Amino acid sequence: MRWLFGCESSGTMRRAFRALGHDAWSCDILPADDESIYHIQGDVLDHLNEGWDAAVFHPPCTHLAVSGARHFAAKRADGRQQAALEFALKLWEAPIPKIALEQPVSVLASVLGKAHQVVHPYWFGHMEQKATCFWLKNLPLLVPTDDVKAEMLLLPKNVRERVHYMPPGPDRWKQRSKTFDGLAKAAAMQWGGAVPVMRDLFEEVAA
C-alpha cells in the first residue's frame, strides 16, 4: 500500500510502515530529521492527489490544543485558529480512501465531532501518559500491544507526564509532538500489516 504521513519530519511512522514493506512517504515543510530519501519536503496539500491508498496526518496543534486555551481569544481574533482548523479539514477531506487524523485534545472536535479514539503511550509499552486523539476514516481502532499503565502509575507525575513537564526551549514543540515508537509500530501492524514484497530491499540497495 502507498501511505502518506503528512506533517511528519521525524520519520517515525514512515519507518514503521516501510519496515513492513509498505511504500510509505513522509511529507513536511521541514526536511526529514533522518535525511531519508522517502521524505517529501513541501506543503502536504500539494501532494494529496498522488494516488495514495492511505494517510496519517499530524496537522500542527499550536493553535488548536486545549492546553493553550488561555491564548484562544487572541488566536480567534487574528485568524490563526481558523486557519489551523481549515488546514486540518482539508487533510480530513483529502481524496484518499483511508485516513487517520491525529491531534492532542483540541478544538478540532468542535468541527469534526468527538474523536473516534484516544490512546496513550502506555498502551504500547512506554511508561508515559499523553492523550492522543484519532479521527479515523476506513481504519480500525487501535488496540493496546503492551499495556504498562499499572507500572507507569507508580512513577512520579512529572516522570509519567514527561512531555507535559518539558522545560521551554527551541525544540520543545517538536519533542512534544513526536510520535512514540510503540504507537507507530502498532499502527503499522494494525492498519497496514506486513506486505510480502521485495521492492524495498532493492530500493535500499540502490540508495
Image (cartoon, grey):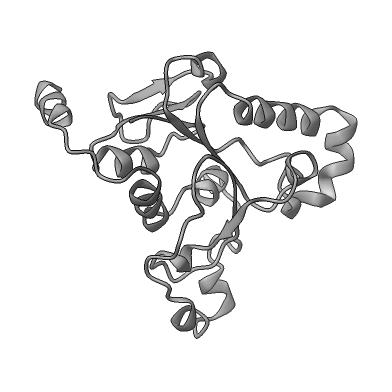
Q: Quadrant of residue 164?
A: bottom right
**Quadrant showing the C terminus:** top left
Left or right, 98 with reference to 182:
right
Q: Residue furthest bottom?
A: 154
Vertically, is 149 above or below 123?
Answer: below
Looking at the picture, how far across and down is residue 97, in whole percent? 50, 29
- Residue at the image point whose x is 43% and y is 73% from the top: 147
- Residue at the image point whose x is 57% and y is 73% from the top: 158
Looking at the picture, how far across and down is residue 140, in whole percent? 49, 50
Looking at the picture, how far across and down is residue 103, in whole percent? 61, 46
Q: Nearer the viewer, residue 190 or 180?
A: 190
- Residue at the image point whose x is 54% and y is 67% from the top: 129
Vertically, is 155 above or below 79?
Answer: below
Whether residue 167 is visible to the viewer of this picture, yes or no, is no
Q: Quadrant of residue 194?
A: top left
- Residue at the image point whose x is 68% and y is 41% from the top: 62
Looking at the picture, how far across and down is residue 157, in whole percent? 58, 77
Vertically, is 189 above or below 25?
Answer: below
Whether residue 5 is visible to the viewer of this picture, yes or no, is yes
**Quadrant showing the N terminus:** top left
Q: Nearer the viewer, residue 86 or 112?
A: 112
Q: How many labels were placed on the picture?
A: 0
Q: Nearer the viewer, residue 99 or 74?
A: 99
Left or right, 68 with reference to 130:
right
